[in-house]
Image (spheres, rainbow, N blue to C red):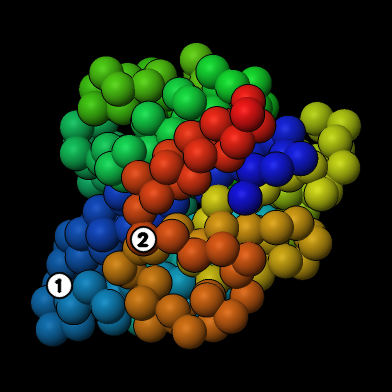
Amino acid sequence: MFQDKKVIIFDMDGTLINSVGIWNEVDKKLIKKFGFSNELEDKAIQKQRDTLLRKFSKSENPYLEYCKTLAQKYQSNLKAEEILKLRYEIAQDYLKNVIDYKPQADKLIQKLKENGFILAIASTTRKPNMDLYRTQNKNMMHKAKIDDYFSLIFTRENVKEMKPNPEIFLKVVEELKVKKDEVLIFEDSLIGIEAAKNAQIQVVAVYDEYSDEEREKINQLADYQIKDFSEVVEILEKELMNEQN
């Protein structure tokens, strides 16, 4: 898995951190504020969000377009900008106090860093959210401060187009001046894995229950599939030991 690799790229939501379910809760509360409570199943909310963000992936601000569509569907008088701000306000407590690394993710990035790999984050997460993870999320800062381990962090604001467009991954390759075959990507979602394949870079599918509906396609496209990061830690340790022998 790691042979001849120099750069390891991680997606954020659903890959490095447990957050997809959190965003379902945020959108659930947001929709309730519009006076609707009959369409609040997590799967329906997530599917709606994923579909709309994919649809608006080439827009200047896909999340603003997403909020505009929510206003139309749920008959809100609020402007899209106001809804986007409200959504961010609802998310604050979750971002600071609830979201955490996936099990063993912190151990993996520590081991990778110790063994000379260059780590990068390439995520459609917005910069204000990433800044909270970096500087205010107590769970993550206690285990592994992002700034201590990642040499490069690209967020939604760093690219014109969202995944499955490969732009964000290609930008990492260009910035770090490495070859594509020296890079390995960790992703959880179908659009993320599609972006990696569109960039012609090997990708590991990290299991996340919120991507189960697309599991078959994910497993077909990904170069590797893992259930959790403890598997990757074991693989890394074995490969490092083999190199020493």
Task: Locate residue 50, reporting x and y percent.
Answer: 46, 72
Asked if the residue under mark 1 is in contact with the one under mark 2, i.e. CB atoms within 8 Å, the reply is: no
| Element type at mark 2 | loop
Q: Residue at x 54, y 82 (%)?
A: 217
In the displayed structure image, the side of residue 111 where residue 28 appears, left or right: left
**For mark 2, does the 10 Å Cα neighbourhood hold few (<14), some (14 to 19), or many (20 or more) residues?**
few
Task: Locate residue 191, reporting x and y percent.
Answer: 58, 69
Residue 98 can be seen, yes or no: yes
Residue 153 can be seen, yes or no: no
| Element type at mark 1 | loop
Q: Which residue is mark 2?
A: 227
User: In the figure, residue 80 lies in which quadrant?
Assistant: bottom left
In the displayed structure image, the side of residue 172 where residue 134 appears, left or right: left
Task: Locate residue 206, reporting x and y percent.
Answer: 45, 58
Type of amino acid at the residue the image marks with label 1: Gly
* Rendered view: 142 above or below 37: above
Q: Which residue is mark 1?
A: 35
Which residue is outermost to the front? 245
Q: Residue at x 16, y 67 (%)?
A: 32
Task: Locate residue 198, reporting x and y percent.
Answer: 77, 67
In the displayed structure image, the side of residue 55 where residue 145 appears, left or right: left
Q: Quadrant of the C terminus?
A: top right
